[in-house]
Amino acid sequence: MPGNLEHHRITEVPDSAYYIPDFITESKEKSLLDKIYTAPIPKWTCLSNRRLQNWGGLPHPKGMVQEKVPDWLQFEDIFSEYGLFGSHAPNHILVNEYKPGQGIMPHKDGPLYFPTVATVSLGCQTVLNFYRNNMDIDQNTCNEFMFSFLLERRSLLVLREDMYINYLHGISDVEVDNISRESIKNSSLLGSKSLAQKVTKNDCFALPRDDTRVSITIRYVPKIIKFKFKT
Ligand SMILES: O=C(O)CCC(=O)C(=O)O
């Protein structure tokens, strides 16, 4: 486990984003995928364009009724080393499954969470796009594309502060990503040197999503509902 998070900072973007390639081993990736795909079928929520599993409870403005996160999804030993969630251990995990051609609309993760999200990618790479809310000429809110990160399988991405609070993130629903040197801001941190070279040497190239990607997003929900049981 790399010691200093600062070595992984994506310096080309506002505070703060960190990218760690090969954060988990191939065997850990396989064991996580095995666990995800042997979870009970009702654990999956099917949305129009992807499936997800929610672990830890449902965040709510009044507080989350906390459920135990299973041991196989516990990353707390790693995250306590970085102090990613202050002095807290993460207590909420979302597992998103994307077939090639599926994505997620630009959004912010919002105020129910401590303003940090850590994402482990499994199975396939993707391109995560970042946007800012702007007003168009008719004073309508629109999302202005700012830049992208290329997320390799087995990597970890951490978003905090400005990147968490003020930027929207989303994944296009395409089967092939058009990678442009201009837009990818984490090319110097990529684990695959051949991919890094391709990004830096080509103005633009096509990168197919040739497998299902599963992301594990790890967060901390501070507001918990505690039940008092009468004895
Ligand atoms: O799959 C990803 O990397 C992004 C997931 C995401 O944005 C979310 O769960 O809110």
Image (cartoon, rainbow, N blue to C red):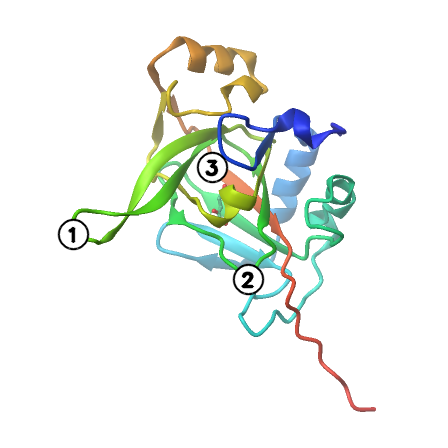
Say which of 177 and 27 sits in front.
Answer: 177
Q: Are dots 3 and 2 in contact, CB under 8 Å?
A: no
Q: Distance between the residues labelled 1 and 3?
A: 39 Å
Q: Mark 2 points at which residue?
A: 112
For the C terminus, the quadrant is: bottom right
Q: Position of residue 230 (x, y in %)?
A: 79, 91
Q: As shown in the figure, which amino acid type bears the numbered disc 3?
A: Thr
Q: Which residue is drawn at 49% across and 49% down?
A: 165
Q: Are dots 1 and 2 in contact, CB under 8 Å?
A: no
Q: Is mark 2 on a helix, strand or loop?
A: loop
Q: As shown in the figure, which amino acid type bears the numbered disc 1?
A: Asp
Q: 10 Å neighbourhood of mark 2: few (<14), some, or many (≥20)?
A: some
Q: What element carries label 1?
A: loop
Q: Name the residue under label 3.
A: 212
Q: What element carries label 3?
A: loop
Q: Earlier in the sequence, mark 1 or mark 3?
A: 1
**Corner quadrant of residue 119:** top right
Q: Mark 1 points at which residue?
A: 138
